[in-house]
Image (spheres, grey):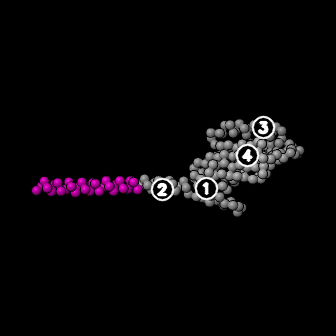
Amino acid sequence: MDFHIHQHRILKLTSRLNLMVVLVMGLLSSNVLLAGFTCYALLHQKVEITPFMGGESYQKTDAVVDTHYLMMMSENFLYARLNVTPETVITNHNRLLSFVDAKHHAEFATQLQKEAQLIQKQQLSSHFDVLSMQAKPAHLTCVVQGILKRNVGRRELPDEPRTYTLKFNYHLGRLTIQRFAHQPGVNHA
């Protein structure tokens, strides 16, 4: 008789243990599933930002940017590099360098340093007027066409039509510049 009672208790304990294993595995799998959903939601949560002066708003997530954001940032980077005077060139270029991708930072810094030395040595001032922009958020590129106006001291140089291509990297909500190049010989519309 004691053997049957003992065997019955072992069966009850085994069934309870099996139930606990099933419950623990269910809770573990639901936690993993919830953690996955949370990560996905954090990376794909859209934020809409409206500029203070009431301009067009833009949307971005930690993984994707929209066309307006890419165009606005491209315009800011262009102005930081091209709207310079001998007095402001170092500050503008340092501001621009803070957005350059780490892989390209050294070569970009060297190029900007050469430009700054030339601008300061020859007392050049420049201003860029944007005529058109074509942003492709899927490729993280923007092509900007415009007119570069330059002065040596107070003497104006002839206006130059220019096209610039900007290539970006976007990771965890941070936009960085990979390429910022003038395209010589590109015709304007």
Determine the image quadrant of residue 30: bottom left
Q: Is residue 2 shown in magenta?
A: yes
The residue where tag 3 is placed is: 117
Which region is colored magenta? Answer: 1-30
Type of amino acid under label 3:
Gln
Instruction: Tell me the crowding category of disc 4: few under 14, some 14 to 19, or many 20 or more residues within 10 angstroms, Cα based.
Output: some
Callout 4: helix, strand or loop? strand
Between disc 4 and disc 1, whose residue precedes? 1
Does 32 appear above or below 105? below
Residue 84 at x, y percent in the picture = 78, 46
Between disc 2 and disc 1, whose residue precedes? 2
The residue where tag 1 is placed is: 60
Q: Residue at x 24, y 54 (%)?
A: 14
Between disc 3 and disc 1, whose residue precedes? 1
Q: Residue at x 33, y 56 (%)?
A: 23
Q: Of the residues tagged 4 and 1, which is closer to the observer?
A: 4
Q: Magenta stretch mostly in which secondary structure?
A: helix
Residue 75 at x, y percent in the picture = 72, 51
Q: Is residue 155 shown in magenta?
A: no
Determine contact: label 2, label 1, CB under 8 Å: no
Tag of residue 164: 4
The residue where tag 2 is placed is: 37
Callout 1: helix, strand or loop? strand
Q: Of the residues tagged 3 and 4, which is closer to the observer?
A: 4
Q: CA distance from mark 2 to mark 1?
A: 19 Å
Q: CA distance from mark 3 to mark 4?
A: 21 Å
Q: Is residue 122 left or right of residue 7?
A: right
Q: Nearer the viewer, residue 163 or 151?
A: 163
Q: Is residue 5 left or right of residue 99?
A: left
Callout count: 4
Q: Say if residue 100 shows up in the picture.
A: no
